[in-house]
Image (cartoon, grey):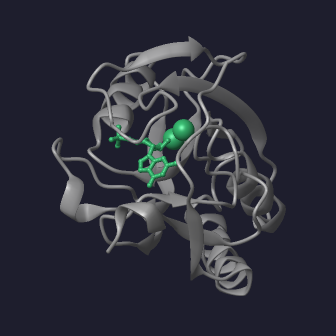
């Protein structure tokens, strides 16, 4: 199904240890924010957020439900498409509930803009966003996560759930993809 990508190497950008420390800090802020909530549903955007959400919910000291939504923006390449399609919808209802959307990367902002509007149309009590990574320099649609793990430069990254052509999701760290044959 997937074409073989050109030869590439991965340079570590954020260590597993730094990620773990940041996830713990985010979870502490999230736990404090939702103290009064008994209706929190954490919504992971598949597939890139699956590792992040797994670590994050285990550090959130509150009763939470977990649900997933799959939206497509990038295909298997490295270009963002402006079109966002819902490939898999939530299983549960979110009307009147606190919704925390968990995303891997905010890039142009098209995906989150679309997903946020879709979920808001279902009238949740509140909707917040937690993104592991943000590339602010790439933004085309004004959208800001309530909580962000790390701001990163305009590099294509993989690991900790994030893929390149469906590979490298299982790397414990975040690394940037480099193509040695295209250099020099
Ligand atoms: P946006 O709609 O904000 O442009 O795109 C967001 C989605 O594009 C992210 O959730 C992620 O799936 C994908 N994306 C953005 N930057 C990168 C990147 O550096 N690496 C990978 N693998 N996916 C990315
Ligand atoms: Mg994503
Ligand atoms: Mg992808």
Determine the residue positioned at 56% across, 60% down: 8
| Residue situated in front as seen by the camera: 73 or 3 | 3
x then y, percent, for residue 115 = 41, 28
Instruction: Relative to 13, say whether 37 is above or below.
Output: above
Instruction: Report x, y in % for residue 7.
Output: 57, 55
Q: How many marks?
A: 0
- Residue in view at x 50 percent, y 15 percent: 86
Residue 62 appears in the picture as rendered:
no
* Residue 24 can be seen, yes or no: yes
Query: At which x and y percent is residue 26?
Result: 59, 72
User: Hey, which quadrant is residue 140 in on the image?
Assistant: top left
Say if 29 sits above or below 182 in the image.
below
Q: Residue at x 70, y 53 (%)?
A: 168
Nearest the eye: 17 or 53:
17
Work out whether residue 7 or residue 131 is closer to the camera in this orientation and state it: 7
Q: Quadrant of residue 89?
A: top right
Quadrant in which the C terminus is drawn: bottom left
165 vs 106, left or right, is right
**At 58% across and 46% down in the image, what residue appears?**
164
Q: Quadrant of residue 98?
A: top right
Image quadrant where one finds the N terminus: top right
Q: Taking 115 as reference, is 38 left or right?
A: right
Can you say whether 28 is above or below 6 in the image? below
- Provide residue 180's location: percent of width, then percent of height: 46, 68
Q: Would you say 51 lies left or right of 146 here? A: right
Quadrant assignment for ligand 1: top left
């Amino acid at each position: 199904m997937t074409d073989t990508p050109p030869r590439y190497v991965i340079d570590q950008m954020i260590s597993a240890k730094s990620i773990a420390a940041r996830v713990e800090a985010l979870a502490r802020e999230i736990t404090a924010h939702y103290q009064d909530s008994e209706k929190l549903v954490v919504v992971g955007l598949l597939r890139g957020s699956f590792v992040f959400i797994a670590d994050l919910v285990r550090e959130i000291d509150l009763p939470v439900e977990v649900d997933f939504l799959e939206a497509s923006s990038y295909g298997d390449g490295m270009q963002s498409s402006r079109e966002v399609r819902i490939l898999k919808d939530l299983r549960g209802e979110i009307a009147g509930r606190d919704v925390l959307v968990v995303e891997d990367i905010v890039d142009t902002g098209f995906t989150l803009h679309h997903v946020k509007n879709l979920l808001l149309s279902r009238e949740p009590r509140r909707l917040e966003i937690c993104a592991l990574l943000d590339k602010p320099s790439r933004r085309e649609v004004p959208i800001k996560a309530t909580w962000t793990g790390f701001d990163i430069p305009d590099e294509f990254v993989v690991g900790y759930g994030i893929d390149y052509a469906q590979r490298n999701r299982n790397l414990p760290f975040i690394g940037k993809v480099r193509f040695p044959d295209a250099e020099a």
